[in-house]
Amino acid sequence: MKQLMTARQLKLAVLASGRGSNFDAIGQAIERKDLNARIVVLISDQSQAPALAKAAGRGIETLPISPRDYSGRDAYEECLVRELEARQVDLVVLAGYMRLVGKVFLQAYEHRVLNIHPALLPSFPGLHAQQQALDYGVKISGCTVHLVDEGMDSGPIILQKAVAVLDSDDEEALSQRILKEEHQIYWQALQLIAEGRVWIDGRRVVIKDN
Ligand code: GRF
């Protein structure tokens, strides 16, 4: 079994493509001192992402990097890795980052990239996870914080939270209730890492008591 990271104040980079509410929730947890971390940069692949404005509002460095300015995914990710290494980040937090992460990125940051997904993985990976849950007719869905590997939402699971699916739900209503839980479990998973309590054993993530 391997310890993900020794206890420390985490230096985080957040990658976001859109709204940035998970980024905000992590920022708030840091301000409340529930999470021992610093967000050193917010990177977005979308120059108009609202997440960029949210980060600027928090006084956090913002870095729009458009994949279209690079010859391909490898070249784009080499640029990302250079920027992350220049800031010596411990962990990369994907928060609504709408791209698959490739091998250049993962080789540089193996077991150091986290994602949040609005379903109980391995159910309903990919886009529109909440609508997928409604269409399938499950009675319980939720959200998952996991380590990122080369697959689609397939890496080792750190934390999950269940959310009941109501008969009255539509995609919007279910998404809102799941989002509320996302805003809790993301910083909680990060804090477990900051406390040095997260260990990896193959696909299994084990949380140890301090
Ligand atoms: C969240 O539902 C997250 O689970 C998914 O993308 C959405 C991002 O929302 N990966 P926000 O940008 O954090 O508000």
Image: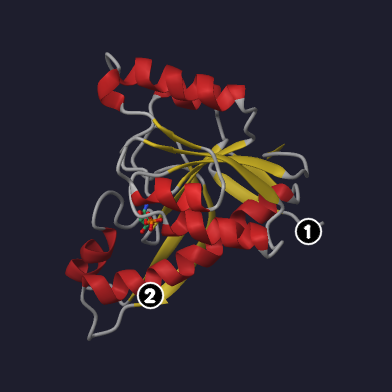
Mark 1 packing: few (<14 Cα in 10 Å), some, or many (20+)? Answer: few
Taking the image as shown, residue 197 lies to the left or right of residue 163, namely: right
Viewer-proximal residue, 208 or 49? 49
- For the point 62% across and 62% down, which residue is it? 29
Q: Position of residue 98 (x, y in %)?
A: 31, 42
Q: Position of residue 108 (x, y in %)?
A: 54, 22
**Residue that extends furthest to the right in the rendered view of this protein:** 210
Q: Is residue 168 above or below residue 73?
A: below
Q: Which quarter of the figure has residue 207?
A: bottom right
Please say whether residue 54 is visible from this viewpoint: yes
Residue type highlighted by circle 2? Arg
Residue at (45%, 25%) from the top-left corner?
80
Q: Most extreme residue toward the left, as rendered?
A: 135
Give amino acid for label 1.
Asp
**Mark 2 and mark 1 residues within 8 Å of each other at the beta carbon:** no
Q: Quadrant of the C terminus?
A: bottom right
Residue 120 in the figure: left or right of residue 26: left
On residue 177, which mark appears?
2
Q: Residue at x 27, y 13 (%)?
A: 71
Determine the CA span between mark 2 and mark 1: 29 Å
Q: Which mark's residue is nearer the viewer, 2 or 1?
A: 2
Q: Secondary structure at mark 2?
A: helix
Q: Is residue 107 visible?
A: no
Numbered tag placed on residue 209 in the rendering: 1
Using the image as rendered, state which of residue 152 and residue 205 is in the foreground: 152
